[in-house]
Every structure is written in C-alpha cells, then in structure tokens.
Amino acid sequence: MLYVILEAVISALLIAGGLFAFIGSMGLAHLRDFFMRLHGPTKATTLGIGCMLIASMLYFSVTQSELHLQELLITLFLFITAPVSAHLLAKVGLHQRLKFVDKTRGKPVEFLDEDIGGKPLSDSSDSNS
Amino acid sequence: MELLYAITTGVLSASGLYLTLRGRTFPVVVGLTLLSYAVNLFLFSMGGLTSNAPAIIGDSSHYSDPLPQALVLTAIVIGFAMTAFAIILAMRARGDMGNDHVDGRKAEDRGERR
Amino acid sequence: MTLLWIPMLTLLGVLVPALTAQRGRPICTLATAALPTLALILTLAQFPAIADGEYPRVALEWMPQLGLDLAFRLDGLSLLFNILILGIGLLILLYAHYYLDKSESHGRFYAYLILFMASMVGIVMADNLLVLWIFWEMTSLSSFLLIGFWSHRSEARKGARMAMTVTGAGGLALLAGFLLLGDIVGSFDMQTVLDSADIILADPRYPLVLVLVLLGAFTKSAQFPFHFWLPHAMAAPTPVSAYLHSATMVKAGIFLMARLHPALAGSELWSALVAVIGITTMVYAAWFALVESDLKGILAFSTVSHLGLITVLLGIGSPMAVLAALFHILNHATFKAALFMCSGIIDHEAGTRDLSRLGKLAKAMPITCLVMSVAGAAMAGFPLFNGFLSKEMFFESTLHTQALGGLSLMLPVLATIGGALSVGYSVRLVHAVFFAEPRHAPPKHPHEPPRLMRAPAELLAALCVAIGLFPALIATWLLAPAVEAVLQAPLEFHLAIWHGFNLPLAMSGAAAAAGITAYVLHRYIRRFIRDFPSRNANLIFEGAVQYISDKAEVITEFFDNGSLQRFMALLIGTALLMGAIGLFQVETLTGPKGNQPLDGVLILGAMLLIFTGIGTAVTHRQRLLSLIMLSVVGLIVSLTFARFSAPDLALTQLSVEVVTMILLMLALFFLPQKTPRESSPSRSLRDVIMCSGLGVVIAALNYAVLTRDTNTISSFFLENSVPGGGGHNAVNVILVDFRGFDTLGEITVLAIAGLAILKLLNRLRLFMPHSDSEGRIWCPDRYPMILTTVSQPVLPLALLVSVFIFLRGHNLPGGGFIAGLITAVGLILIYMARGVDWTQQRLAFPFQPIAILGVGIATLTGFGSWLFGYPFLTSSYDHFHIPLIGDLELATALLFDLGVYLAVVGATLMILANLGKVTTSHRPSKDDSTPIPSGLHRTDISDTANPNPDAKETV
Amino acid sequence: MMSHLIILPVVLPLAAAVILLLARFGAFTRRLLALIATGALLISCVMLVGKASQGEVLYYALGNWQPPFGIVLVLDRLSALMVTVTAILSMGCVIFACGGDDEKGSNFHGLFQLQLMGINGAFLTGDLFNLFVFFEVLLLASYALLVHGGGRDRIQSAVHYVVLNLAGSALFLIAVGMLYGATGTLNMADMARAVSVMDPERNGLVVAGALMLLVVFGLKAAILPLYFWLPRTYASAPAPVAALFAVMTKVGIYAILRVYSLVFGDQAGTLEALEQPWVWWMALATLVIAAIGVLAARDLRLLVAYLVLVSVGTLLAGLGMHSPQATSALLFYLVHTTLVTGGLFLLADMIGLQRGKVGTRLVKGRTPIHATALGLLFLLGAIAVAGLPPLSGALAKALLLAAADGIQRAWLWPPLLIAGLCALVALSRAGSTLFWRSQESDNTDDQLSGWHWAGTAWLLIASPLLVVLAGPLATYTEAAAAQLNDPSAIIQALLPTEEDAP
Amino acid sequence: MLDTAVVISGALIALSLLLNLFRLTRGPDMPDRILALDTMYVNSIALILLMGLWMNSKTYFEAALLIALLGFISTVAVCKYLLRGDIIE
Amino acid sequence: MMRLRSWLPTPGLSLLLLIVWLLLVNQVSVGHLLLGGILAIAIPRLTSRFWDRQPTVHKPMKLVLFFLRVVGDIIVANLQVARIILSPWRRSRPHFVEYPLMLEERFTITILASTITLTPGTVSANLRMDGKTLLIHALDVEDDATLIRTIRERYEQPLKEIFEC
Ligand code: NA
Ligand code: NA
C-alpha cells in the first residue's frame, strides 16, 4: 500500500516536473520579447527539475532501501548557477539593446547611454581593511 | 535503432567534412570538431549498441563492450588537444598573414592568381 | 691483390693534392704524380703474365645481394687503356703545372684530375658490370668538376652541366642495359657475361640491351646525335680537354664497345647500329671541324669524327677491324693529346684561340709549330705518321665488310669523304695558325712556352713519328694482348709501314687531294654555310632545359596550386573511393543481428543531432551561431553515450565540451566574426555531393558493423577487470592498466599541445576588434560582479567534485581525466570572472611543470614496475584494513591516474590561461580605444628575449 | 635492463623530455642532456638491431598483459632497423640544432625528444590503436617543432599540414573502428589471425577499413594525390626539424609495410595484398610528379623536399612490387634516403645562412665563406641523393631496379631512371648556381658553428659508410624482408597456440 | 503507473527540447539562442534523471551533476564574449 | 579557539563542503567523514586566496528561515509564471524596475540578485557598476514601488540582518 502511494507520488512528481519543464520551454518559445522569454526557463525549468529530483530521490531511496539525497546536490548547483546565466544573458540583452514589447514600463538608462553606473564597486582588497 | 544511429553518424560526418572544405580557418576547425564527434560516435558503436549495461563490474550478467569506450575516451582527449592546437594555429595564422583564409591570402590575391 | 692496388692507389691519389696543395705547386705536382706513376709501374709489371695469355683478376665480395663484387681484371685491353690513361695523365699533369695560372687552385685541379684518372682506371679494369658502371658514372661526375673548373665563366658552367646531363643520362641507360644483361646471364661477372654471347643473342631482350648499352657508349663517346656536348666541354682548361677529350673519357664509350664486343657484337643489329652511327658521326663532325673557327672547337669536332671512325671499325667487327680500332685508339690518343697541348700553348701565349686572329706564328714558336705539324700530319693520316697506318687499315676494313648488307658499298665512299675532310681541317689547323696571314692581330705577342711545358707534346709527337715508322716494334706488343682480349682469341697480325699500292692507298690519295682542295676552298664554304642559321648547341640545350623546367613548373603548379581546399577535396575523394570499394564488396548491408527497436527519445536525439549537425554546416558563415549549434551536437552526443551505457564517455564529452567552447570563444574574438561568401554555388554543390558521398559510406559501414555480431577480445577485460586490475569500472581499468600505454601517449599529446600552443602564442600579433560584429562598443563592465561572486563558491565545489570523480574512477564512472577537466574548468571560471592579472597573482604555480609533472608521474609509475621485475606499466593493488575506516584499496593505477589528472589540469590551463593572458595585457583599454577606422586594433607583442615564455607565468 | 631493452626507444626519449621540460636548465645543460639522451637512444637501438638480427621475433607486453589483450611492442628486424635509422638521423639533428636553432623558440629539445618517442613508438608497436596514439604523438610534436621559431611561411604551411593531418586522424579512427568491428581485435598479429579464419561475408568490411587505413598511411607517406602538404611544409620547417621530418614520411611507408604484410599476408586468402595495386600505380605516379617537381623547384629547400617526394615514390614502388627482393631493396633505399635527405636539409640551411638575403633561393648570390667545404658536402649529398655512384644512392637504386621482375620493369625503370636524371639536372643546376655562379663578397659574417658542420657531416658521411657496409646491410634487409614475408612467424611468436607448445 | 509517468514526463521533456531547438534556430537575436542552449542543458538534466529512473540505475547521476555544475560555464563564456569580446581578460 | 580559527578559517564553507562530500559519496561512514573532513579543511585553505571575503553568518536560524521562504516563493513564482505562459490572452505587464540597493557587500548583493532571479516573475537584469542599483525586469507587476517594497521586506532586510550586521 505504501508502495502504491509512493509510486503515485513519484509519478505525480515526475509528470509535474515534466510539465513545468515543458511550460518553461514553451515560454521560451512563444513569449514576445527576449526579456520576457528569459523568465520561462529560469524559473519553470528549475522547479521542473526540482520535482524530478525529488522523484528520483524517493524512487532510489525506496528501491535501494537506503536514503538517496545526492539529487539535492544538483538542486544546490542549479540554485547557484542558474541565476548567473540569467543575469549575464539579461546583461547581454541590455547591452545589445534588444527590442522589447511596447507596453513594457520603465525606461532604464541602459537603453539610453552605454556608459553607465560610474565607478565599479570596490574590490575586496580594500573593503576588507 | 542501428539504422538511425548509422544515419546520424553519416550526417554528422558529412556536415563536418563539408565544413573542412571551406576556405576560412574557423569553419574548418569547427568542421574538424564536428567530424571528431561523428568519428567518436562511429568508433564507440563498433562494440555494438547496448542499453543499460555499463561496463561496471557488478552483479549484472551482461555488459557493454568496454574497449571501444576506452578507445573513444583516448580519441576524445587527443581530439581536444588537436582542436586546441588547430584553433590557436588559426589565430596565429591570422596574426601573421593578416587574414583568416586557409591559404593565407586575401580574396583579391586569389582573383589575380586564377 | 697487387691488382687491387692499381685502381686503389690512383683513387687514393685524390687525397695527395688536397694534402700537399699548401706546400707550393712544384711539390704538389711531384707528390701528385707519385701514386699514378706507381700504378703505372704496377700495371707494366703485370705485362709478362698478360703476354703469356693470362690475365690477373681479383674479386672481393661487396654486395652479393646485388651480384656486385669489387672485381678487377687486367687483360690486354685494360693494359692498353691503363697505359694511355696513366701515361698521358702524367704528361697532362706536367703540362698543367705550367698551364694553370698562379692564382688558380692547382690542388683542387689536380684532385679532380686524379679522381677522373682513377675513374677511368676503374672502368677499364672493372671485372664486374656494376663496378664498371660505378666508375663510368664517376667519370661523368669528375668531368663535370673539371669542365666547370673555371666556374666564373658562364660557358664553363653550362658546358659542364651539359656534359654531365648527357653522359649522366647515358649512364642511366647503361645501368638499365647492364641490369638486363645481368638478368639474362644471371651474373654481372665480366667473364661470365663475355662467355655468354649465345644466351644473350638468343634472348628476346637482346635488342633492348644493345640499344641501352649503346646509348651509354654513344653519349660518352659523343656519337651522333649526342655529339653536341663535346665542343662545349672545350670551355674547360686545355689540359682537361687534352686529357678527357683525346685520350680518356670519350674513349670510355669506345672501350665499352670493345669490352662487350664478345658478348654483344655477334648480330647484324650491332653492325648496323654501330657502323651507321659511327660513319654518320665521322662525316658530320668532320664537316663541322672544317668550318669551325675556334682552335679547340676544330679539335673537338675532329675528336668526334675520329671517334666515329673507331666506332665504324667496331661496328664492322672483323678481327682486322678490331685491330684497326685499337690501333687508332692508341694513335688518336697520341696525336690528339699533342694537338690539344699545342693549342693550349698557343692560347696561353697568343691569348686567343680564334683562327681569324692567329697566323704566322711559325717564326715566334718554331718548336711548337713543328710539334703541331707532326701531330696534324698524323691526324690527317699522312704517310710516315701513325695516323696513316690505322687509317689505311680503316679503309681496308670498310672495303671488306658486309656489315650494312646492300648498303655496305656506301661505307668506303663515306670513309673517303671523311678522310678528305680530315685532311682539310688538319691542313687548315696547321696552316692557318703558323703560316697564313692573320686577319686580325692577336692580343698578345707570342713566344715559345717554358721548356717543360712543351715536353709532353714533344714526347707525344715523337711517338707519332716513332709508331708511324716502326709500328711493329712499338705497337704490336701492346696491341696483341688487347686484340686478344677483345676477340677472346689470339690474332696473328703484322703491322707494316707499307702494304704496296692498293685500293686503300688510292682512297688516301683521293682523300688528301680532296682535303687540300677543300681547305683552299673553305672560305667559300664558310660563306656558303653562313647563310644557314647557326645553331649553337649550348643555346638549344639550355633552352630545352629551361623549357622543360618551365613546363615542370607549370605542371607542378597545376597539381599543387597551394589551395588547402583542393588538397582536402582530394583527401576526401580518395577516402570516399576507398571506402566505397570496400562497401561494394559487402553483399548484404543488414547483418544477421538486425535492428533493435526504436523509442521516441532515440528518434528525438537523432533528429536533434541531424538538425544541429547540418545546422552547424549551414550556418557556418555566422560563426557564433554555428558554434552554438556545435555545442548542442556535443551535448546530445554525450547524452547518446549515456544512453548506450557509456557513462565515462558521457562525463568526458561533457567536460571536454565546456573547455572546447571556451577555447573557441577565446579564438573567435581574434578571428573575423563572419565568413565572407566565397565558394561558388557549383563548388558548394561539388562539396555537398562529395561529403554526402563519404557520409553515406560511413553510415553504411557503420550500419553493416552494427548489425553484425563480432567475437571480440572484450570479454577478457570484463573478466579480468576486478581480479587483474583491481577495479570495477572496466573502462577505467582499460585506460589505466590494460591499455595504460595508450593513455600515457594520450597525456603526452595533451602536454605537447600545451607546449606547442605556447610556441604559437609567442610573439603573436593580434587583431582585436574594439566593437562586436554589429559595431557596438564593448560593454564597460569587465568583471560582472555577480559572476565574480558566484565563481568563488564554484571553485571549491568543483575541486571537491574533482576529488570525488577522481577517487571513484577505478570502480565507477570517473577518473583522472574527467577530474582534471573539472578542476581546470573551475579555475578557468575564475579567469573569466576576475581576469588574468588577478588570478595569476593568486595561482602560485606555473602550468607547464604541472603538465610535465603529470606525464612524469605516469612515466615513473611505469618505471616502478621494473623494480619488481615486471614490464613497464605493470600495475599492482592491494587491500588494507584500517581500523574504524574499513577496507581501503590502493592501486598503482591510482598513481598513474594522478599523473593523468595533473597532465590534464596543467595542459588545459597552459592552453587557456596563456591564451587569455596573451590577449589581455595588450588590449586597448577603454580610455585609449578611440575607434580606429579599420575597425581593428593590431598589437605586436614581442617577448622574444625570453626563450621560455612560460617562465613569466610564475609569480 | 636488458629485458626492457625493447621499450627503451620509447621511454628513454620520454624520460629525457620530462627532465628537459620540467627543470629550468641553461642552454648548455639542455644541449648536454639532449645529446646524452640521443646518444643513449642510439646505443640502445644498436643493441636492438643486434638482438633482432638473431632472427627471433620478440615482444614486450606492456603492463604484463599478454597479447592479444594488452598492448605489445614487437621487435623484429624491420622495427629494429627503423628505430636505429631514426636514432642516427636524430643524432645529426640534435647536434645541428645545438648550433643555435634550438634557442630560437621554447622547449626545442624537450619537444624533439617527444617527437622521437612518437616515431619510435609507431615503429615498435604491435597494436593498431596504439599506432594511432603514437601517430598523434609524433604529429603533434611535429606541429610544435614545425612552428618553432615562427615566421609566415612556417605558419602557413603548418595550417595545411595540420588540417590535412587532423582529417587524416579522423579517418584513421574510422578505419581502426572498422577493423575492430569486423575482426574484434586490435593487436595486428591477432587481427591477421582473425582475418584468416573470418567468415568471407565480412570481407567487404575489412576491405573498407584496410583501404581507408591505406589513405591515412598514404597521407603520412605523401603519396599522390595526398602529398601536397609535403613540399612547402618541409621547405619551411626549421632545418633540424626538416631533417628529422625525413623520417616522417617513412613512418607512413613503414606502417603500410607492417600492417599489410602482416594482416594481409599470405594467410589472408582472397584479401592478400589488397593494397598492392593501389600502392604500385600511385607510387609510380608520385615518382613522375615528384621528378617534375624536382625540375621545377627554384629553391634549394624546396628541391630537397621534392627529392624526399621522389624517395617516397621510389620506396612505395618497391612496396608495390610486393616481393621479398623488392622489400629488401626498399629497406636498403630507405636507410640511405632518410639519412641523406636529412643531411641535405641541414646542408641547405647552412648554405642559406651563408648567402645572405637570397638564402636558399637558386639565384645568383654571394659566395659562401666556406665555399669549398660546403661545396664538397653538397657534392657528396647531391651524388648520394641523385643515385649516382659511388655513393649509397646508386647501390640502393640498382638494388631496387634489379628487384623489379617481368613487366614491373617496364613500368618502374623508365620513371625511376628518369627521376634520377631529373635530380641530376636539377642538382647540377643548383650546385653550379650556389657555388659557381656567385659574386665575390667580403662576407665575413660566419654564422656557422662547429655544431652545424658536425651535424651535417654526421648524416652525409652515412652515404659513403653505407657503401662500405653495403654487404652487411643488404644481408640484414634481406633477412628483414624474409621475416616480413612470413607473417606466421610473428603470429606464432605473439600468439602461440597449444599445438605449437613442445 | 511509474512507467507511464516516466514516458509522459519523457515526452514532455522531449517536446521541451524541440521547443528549445526552435528558439535556438529562430533567434532572432544571439541572446535568445544562448538562452535556448542554456535551457537545453537544464532539460538534459531532466532527461538524464528520467533515464536513470527508467533503467533503475544511478550510473548516470554524475552526468546530471556535471551539467548542473559546468553547464552554465559555456553560457557564461558566450555572454562574456558578447559583452566584452575577450572572455579571459 | 584561536587555533580552531587558524585551522578552520571558514567554518561555513567547510561545513558545506563536508555535507556536499557526504551527499556525493551518499554514505556516512567513519572513513568518509574523515576524508570529507580533510577535504573540507584543505580545499578552503587552497582556494581561500580566490575569495574576496568570506561572509560571516550572524544569524544562522534566520538564514534557514530565509532559505525556506525562498523555496516557497520559487514554487509560487513558478505557478504564476506558468499561468502567464499558458494564458497568452491574459495581458502581462512587463516592467523594468530600478531597485536602489541597501546592501553593500558583494556577496549579499549577489545572493539578493540570485534570489530575485529565482523568485516571482523577476529577473535581475543588471547590477550597475557602482553596485548601488539593480535593474530588474519583471514579467507582470502593477507598479514598481510595490515590487521594490516587497523585495526590500522579503529578501533584502533579512539578508542584511543575516550577513551585514
Ligand atoms: Na584515456
Ligand atoms: Na574512468
């Protein structure tokens, strides 16, 4: 019985994961400008992967009857790295002044003048002292 | 499955080879890299296509052929070294010749020579 | 054994002038003469034996596989020639002592001369066809050096090359002929060949052999139509001409015909070929001698003509003809050498050899005049001189031969014409120089040369008279063994000064009359021939050589047009052809194993690969896009590896993929961002067809193998992985143990790549665009802060994962290579996030030693097994039980894998970090990067002063 | 140590390279180490020849894994001869490089030793994939050495050389894959055994693999139509490297000889000598084109490069004749041509150094300072390479010509003899231009050191020495050819079967 | 039930990859393509996990781990290239 | 204590590495604790020179809470975004928002930026070079003030307390 419930949970998680991944990719495919498309994969996909990781963790913990938490690592790594990709991509989008939909509000200086922001933030070497 | 696999190696090889026939160094290097992917797939498959039987000795009864895998590993590493050298040679050639044509000459020069 | 000393002493003589040249010319000349004199004495010492019909031989085994023995003989023929070669050679040496200018390098000249002498001695004494050929070609070489001795003169250089080319070509034909001959006879031994006439004449290859051998002989002896080089060889110093073109080199061809006479001459083909060529040469050259105006030119053509005469005699081939030929060889050598020496004296004293500027020299040079008149009379064949005797025998022979069948009657007629011309030019030679009025004044006021310079010519002239008067006494002893050697049987003969009034004498008379008439009329003749365009053989030859080499250049450029695209197309085309040939022999493509079922993910993967693979090619002109396509291919390939049970491969491919991408991105910055359209549509179509062809072949072969089961050696690895290699991951055990030697080579390749790239980066001049392909100025944010910060925890995590992957590799997917790449990528991320300078300050180690250390550790692991008496790279492992911790397995393979790890880290960083470094310090900073119109910023980095650029890497 | 003798030609250079590259020595120490290492290599190679000439096929099982499972190095007369020739050649190159070429860029000696390791490994290995690995080692080392010192020409020719060889490497992998897929093994002797008992249904697969492999080897050997990388590459390489490259084409030729004589020897049934027609006809065509190239060359180095190509055509023609006599002859010729063309590359560089701006171009230039000595060496080299007596080329060529049989003569003799004539014409023209047609000058800038002279002389002296030793060498090559002609001996030695056991 | 779920999930991931490929090909701008590539990497992790579940094997886990740890570095490199040209400066 | 500091200059990182190691090997044994411990000490020492300054966690409990909140937000955010993606007829209101940063340290700013990216319909698009303004692209917001306030309260304040006090 427990196994049936667990199997149902794992199955549900898997399908949910697949769905989230799919939705993310759909966003990437059909949202209307680059900055909007950026949202899809960075979030939906992370959750999709998360669901699958949990499913995998459960599955192996059950079938091999010992706790499998390795999948947490993947989540950890993704949490660390995914925002960096997104951030840099957005920076590139701004740098290339990609078109965005007209209804977007806010007029960031990035689109007006290349040279922005003044002095770079000081390095550790002097902020440490 | 085998047919599809073979077609894929064929297509990748053909694409890579096509690129190696271009006149500029960068596509040529990309082509060589693509070709090496194809060749690795080819070499890998010489031990047959086996699902879910990695050559990790355990309690399983059948394993994939580990030898082609080891060969491909070696081939990947060597391919990487070669790609690295080739691409930097391409940079160097551009630095020395002033253009990135594989024959080290500009388009107008070649027009004259023909 | 004494026999061996004759050629060897002469050959050793080459060193004497080289060693004594510094001690002044007299000493050098004397010293140089010593060894040839000794050789001559040794030769003469053999005479009694030869006279008894014996001939001494010596043979040392040299190269039995080729049938080549160092074999010499001294029979009558060799004896005759040896005396000529060494005797006249010594006279020439004496003559040259005076002839050469003080400033000229006599040592070099003598060395060449002796080398030539030795080669000639070798030819005439060779008792093995191949030995003969070896010395034969050596005469071509040494004559090249001698003719070109006055190398500052264009004529000399050209003449030397021409002689070399013609005689060299003949020598190659001769080699072919000899090899065939040896094949027919089964040996290169001279006597065996001479005794095998029956076999040779019966062999279907005989005509070919004959033609090839005669080609050799005719080119050397300047027979028509190969005569043209000889006059141009006159650019040599006169001693050379006197030696090479009277007594020796040109006689080598004659010698060859005489030597092989027993083996080859017994056919109509021989007579026809040899006699016709000989008579043609004789008349043709005599005509040119008559109209030539250069003193040495006349002598050169006359030489050709007389050689033709001898050739005719050998062609006729009757015993008397052979005797006549040998006699004329002797006579021609004496009078022609004398004539050359005299002409040299005249040239030396009067400063010119042009007949129109010479004349009336009899008063100034009475003795020379006398000598030259005697020798000239001998050449003309006037009675009482030696030339007369052999000429009479020649006429006699032409009268009695049937060598040319129905056309044999032509021979005496042509012989008489030749004789007449000979008289004509001889008379002209003497008369024009010493008695006629010169048309222009000579450049110098002539007088007699030094006494000893004249002496050789005087001696030879005296011989001409002596032989002419007492032939039986002086020549018979020499000729008898020679004739016996040629005919391979003794011949009874009597040389006499007078044979009574007979037809030959009448022919001589007619020739003399006609000859003198011809000389009288020769001005008109000359005027007549001036109307014909002159054909300078030198110009024609040089022109031909030039034409051929120009054509060669055109052909070479046609094939090798310097286009890599063509070379690649040829390579691919060849591979396609070869693969297809194999494919056509595969009867059924689908093997017995057949296909496994497909699933959706497989189809998807294949679709992705095919799409992005083709996409990489199609988008190649937008380079970044092409690169992104490529990296999808890489990703799917690694998924494919995972799908088909190769986790190690998947991991490796993934990590290599990242590094490759970084590398290509780095490079792309310095290369143009886009490829211009270059290939014509037809070229692209050709490429597509060819590449698809090879793609189809590869796919078909792949499919054919995949659908067949093969019994492989793999089961051994699977069975022995744990018991033999101590690891559960068979792939890793293969890599570090079963085939560790491959891996050692592979990390060596990586290390070399690093070193090679260092070389390429040295003094690299870079093109750095100040804006991207769309013209946007680069973003000022060099090190985006978020990237910088995130890179900090990623590095320790990457290192931890490296250790994990490294340690588990032996039993589970992983290993040193992947671990090394992960470490390297972690560090590269720091480089990207923080820049070279910042990172370099904190990386306290240079990369080259790390890479090399890796290779070193792997090698040392290999050596380690020697200590235990096992072959290189023999692994060993053991289990240790440690309290609390449990079982621990230690394998030497792990040490080897550590080497792999270090090599990978070192090499990868060496490549990427150095590449990154090269660019950075020279990048125009934002402040000074005012847009440059060309759109490129070119920086010249020079650090040649430091031969080891990696040294700067250490901080 | 004696039991490990077979692997010394591989690990000695490797160890030397590691030491050279690891520590920061001064130029003197580096040279000393390089000379010692090369000397030790030479000694061990000579010992190997001694061992091999006893006639037994020996092998060294790496990691103590017996064939066909592990990688083996195989010592027979042929491999011993090849490594020895390489060692002799490399000695000359190293000596010459000490004259200053080694300091024109980084890590010369280390890379040079690695190059030697690659070449020797390729000569010794008995495993097809290991051959690939050593090919890559020697290729990458050759790339590095080729660009040593830099310069436009070098870089340009390197691009062609590298790209073609990378494509060749890919093809190599496909071919090895095919052969593994069809026969299930990588050890060449085992492959030979497998081919002999194989289901004929698989012949096509083996043929495809073997012929593609032939393309790869043909590319390395520089056979028509794959030779185009060679002239410019060799002409532009630094002299000691170009000289060492003289043995690189021979690696390709060796590989053809080794693989096809063993795997497709008489036990291979219908597949026997499947490479023969291709090699034979293409070799003759190579010979012709190369001879034309010799005539066309307007630069001494290019001329020598085309002469290398002539030697390739000659050697491969010997291979294509497919008889023990021809094989023996080609091995004799190989020894001669490798050393002499190597020496000529060195000599060309010396001449170029002395002629100022015109370098090795065949135009009027200033007289070299040491015209006599250089001229003498040139004469020596030219006579040898053109195949004129009394030097080794003549004997080698005569041996090859004599080995031709029947109709082969009609095809081989004319091109081979005419190629010799072309060489003669071109070399006499080159020599007369370089040494005779020059203007006097007060050139006192002597850039030649004793190292240069010693290195060049070391190689060129080989030619007269080979004449003296022609008998013993020919005996050796004859025995080597006989050994090659009997692949079952190698198969027996590596894979003894039960019934052979006493 | 689990098998069905794996198949459905796999199909969804496959569709996702196709959508990613569409964006990668279509662009229109380079950042879009890179974003698509990055997403493909993440979706590959899902695919690998599914494969592990399907085959009941943890052998492939490290591949997923490696993509999570290193996959973004390619993206970083390309972005850095588009921003600055020189990715290591 | 001093000795512990010198042995373990960055206990947080070391702990993280130890946990990661145990997760990697997927077993808790004495051997692996020992090996993991060694690595957890050695690796930070090796890589310390590549750190600007390692953050000190002042309030560990708050960090855990913060973490849980973020995870929760991620789930919510995903649902929101999914809704937007799946309902193209619903008009989204994209907005570029300039967020004035209160935080000062690079590390905390990075955490904030990452959190913003991972959570409700926002992506941190550009951290300006002066480090004082973060440009955020929001997929669907009413007005920027609300967004700024939400971020400030939910994330920036807690972060400030955890790391920068
Ligand atoms: Na490997
Ligand atoms: Na491994």
Image (spheres, rainbow, N blue to C red):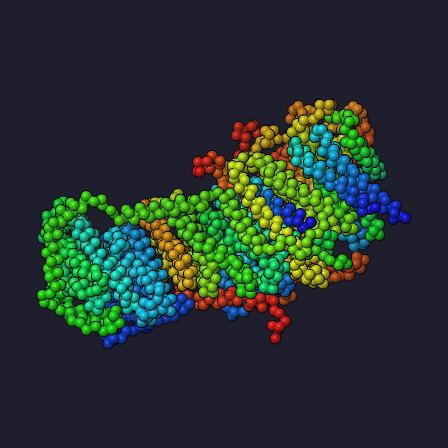
Q: Is residue C354 left or right of residue F52?
A: left
In the depicted structure, whether residue D48 falls above or below residue E75:
below
Picture quadrant of residue E25: top right
**Quadrant (top left/top right/bottom left/bottom right) for the N terminus of chain C:** bottom left
Between residue C350 and residue A64, name the one nearer to us.
A64
| Image height of C820 relative to B93, above or below | below
Q: Residue at x 54, y 69 (%)?
A: D56
Q: In which image quadrant can residue C858 be found? A: bottom right
Q: Quadrant of the C terminus of chain C?
A: top right
Image coordinates for residue F89, horizontal then vertical, percent: 77, 27
Tell me what residue is drawn at x 66 percent, y 49 percent: B3
C767 or C337: which is nearer to us?
A: C337
Q: Is residue A85 left or right of residue D22?
A: right
Of C718 and F104, the residue lying toward us: C718
The residue under the point 80% across, 29% down is: F152
Residue C306 seen in the current view = yes
The residue closer to the viewer here, C379 or D145, is C379
The picture places residue A61, in percent across and down from the top left corner, at 83, 49
Q: Quadrant of residue B89?
A: top right
Residue at the right extreme of this rendering: A1
Q: Is residue C345 visible?
A: no
Left or right of C730? Residue C261 is left
- Image spot of residue C755 (x, y percent): 56, 48
